[in-house]
Image (cartoon, rainbow, N blue to C red):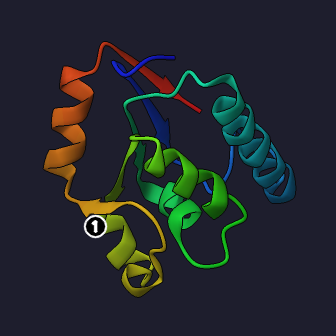
Amino acid sequence: MDRDTVVLFTRNGLGDAPAELQQVLATKFLTLTLESGELPGKILFYTEGVKLVCEGSAVIPQLKEMEKRGVELVICQTCLNFFNLAEAVRVGVVGGMGDILTTLQKAGRVLSV
């Protein structure tokens, strides 16, 4: 990956699988991405994906490290409000669908995981 790449999380985990497996896969994906050193420019979180940046998420440490290394984490405000999670965000920046749309339109590559 590179800084022109955007990763898109729309689930509370990775892929279509049982919830526990999705969580394991998301943790492994983010850990291996950090270890590779090839980080995306941004990671977008919307629909169920917003739960990954909230209190209780197993991937908060990996996401905080990514943010520390310059990866922008953008979270959908509408989705947070829908799930009543606005106060539970622990990492990233809350934005609107306009921010997400602009990021997708400007991205060189979008990976939906």
Residue 32 coordinates in the image, percent (x, y): 74, 32
Residue 87 lies, with reference to residue 78, above or below; the image says: below
Work out whether 19 lies above or below 27. below
Name the residue at 17% across, 46% down.
99
Residue under label 1, please give it: 77
Front position in the image: 83 or 104: 104
From the image, which quarter does the C terminus lie in? Answer: top right
- Asked where in the image residue 93 lies, by quadrant, the reply is bottom left
Classify 55 as above or below 12. Answer: below
The picture places residue 71, in percent across and down from the top left corner, at 41, 40
Classify 10 Å Cα crowding around label 1: few (below 14), some (14-19), many (20 and above).
many
Number of numbered labels in the structure image:
1
State the residue lying farthest toward the top. Answer: 108
17 relative to 4 in the view: left or right:
right
State the residue at coordinates (41%, 53%).
46
User: Residue 78, percent across and down?
Assistant: 28, 67
> With respect to residue 93, does 24 lie above or below?
above
Question: Residue 79, how many percent across, how many down?
Answer: 36, 66
Q: Is residue 31 left or right of residue 85?
A: right
> Splitting the image into 4 quarters, where does residue 100 fall?
top left
User: Identity of the amino acid at label 1?
Assistant: Gln
Mark 1 lies on a secondary structure that is: helix
